[in-house]
Image: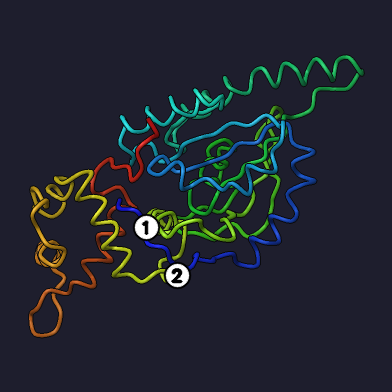
């Protein structure tokens, strides 16, 4: 994406997020492991530095979600990058059992240390307390429901579903705390806010639909020029104007307005939703630093 224009920072910090952020400190102190969920399609943009600043020396695991919707090569590059930075990171589809095995493997040293400490003071084994953090709509509740084996936390493909903290007992070994998604109070650039809106982590009404869809289309055009072939029959959009692309989408999907003209507003909205739902293929909006 081109360098963002210098504009006023975008502010989006609903009241329930501010309340949740203020209440995190005591939960952090009582937790054994922080599990941070970020979106594999834009790992950097979907992490909140405000949350990371609170962690200190607390054991921390980064989980890149929605692996099935992200470019696998880019995801591997991101994991390699984070691991070189000393972070404990993995990626997966949060609905599948494999992510549970990966979590257990990563948490094993922490469990061993906890059990040794409990044995030393004569305490019965206590469940490992996991604090699950992340911005809205990255899959926190899906992750918790998978671990719990039931619908223990509300999950939906839209931001702002979880409104308050809730402890969820998974087994004799795990207790998890689900927290509301917390976004930064301000975004350092318009580019970051656009990426989060494309992912569905910011409600679309916060940013104009036309500008948001145009930004997504620009990213897809430069990174995956053939990604619209299967869904919309547009084999290569490199030389197509935005309006020509939207017209093609509208005709293919039957988005026809008054007078039989293509409804390009519906085409823009449809493009965003199809990307968020993974219907355009496995695509990533951010490349890992070299």
Marks 2/1: CA–CA distance = 18 Å
Tell how many labels: 2
Q: Quick check: 24 above or below 97?
A: below
Give the secondary structure at mark 1.
loop
Q: Quick check: 259 above or below 252?
A: below
> Marks 2 and 1: CB-CB under 8 Å?
no
Can you identify the residue that label 2 sits on? 206
Please give the label number shown on residue 4: 1
| Point 49% across, 59% down: residue | 159
Q: Please identify, in this view, whether the residue under mark 2 or under mark 1 is nearer the observer.
A: 1
| Residue 281 x %, y % | 24, 43
Visual colour scheme: rainbow
Q: Badge 1 local density, few (<14 within 10 Å), some, or many (20+)?
A: few
Give the secondary structure at mark 2.
helix
Q: Quick check: 125 above or below 185?
A: above
Please give the label number shown on residue 212: none
| Residue 169 x %, y % | 69, 39
């Amino acid at each position: 994406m081109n360098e963002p224009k210098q504009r006023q920072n975008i502010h989006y910090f609903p009241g329930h997020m501010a309340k949740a952020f203020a209440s995190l400190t005591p939960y952090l102190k009582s937790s054994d492991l922080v599990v941070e969920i970020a979106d594999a399609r834009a790992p950097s943009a979907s992490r909140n530095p405000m949350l990371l600043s609170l962690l200190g020396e607390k054991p921390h695991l980064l989980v890149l979600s929605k692996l099935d919707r992200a470019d696998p090569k880019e995801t591997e590059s991101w994991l390699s990058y984070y691991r070189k930075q000393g972070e404990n990171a993995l990626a997966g589809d949060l609905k599948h059992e494999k992510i549970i095995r990966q979590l257990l493997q990563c948490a094993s040293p922490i469990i061993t240390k906890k059990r040794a400490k409990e044995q030393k003071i004569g305490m019965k084994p206590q469940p490992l307390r996991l604090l699950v953090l992340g911005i809205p709509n990255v899959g926190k509740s899906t992750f918790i429901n998978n671990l719990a084996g039931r619908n223990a936390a509300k999950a939906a493909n839209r931001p702002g579903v979880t409104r308050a903290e809730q402890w969820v007992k998974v087994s004799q070994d795990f207790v998890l705390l689900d927290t509301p998604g917390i976004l930064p109070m301000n975004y350092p650039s318009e580019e970051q806010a656009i990426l989060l809106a494309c992912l569905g982590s910011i409600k679309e009404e916060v940013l104009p639909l036309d500008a948001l869809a145009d930004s997504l289309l620009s990213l897809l055009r430069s990174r995956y020029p053939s990604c619209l072939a299967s869904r919309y029959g547009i084999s290569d959009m490199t030389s197509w104007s935005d309006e020509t692309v939207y017209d093609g989408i509208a005709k293919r999907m039957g988005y026809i307005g008054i007078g039989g003209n293509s409804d390009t507003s519906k085409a823009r909205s449809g493009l965003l939703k199809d990307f968020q739902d993974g219907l355009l293929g496995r695509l990533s909006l951010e490349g890992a630093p070299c």
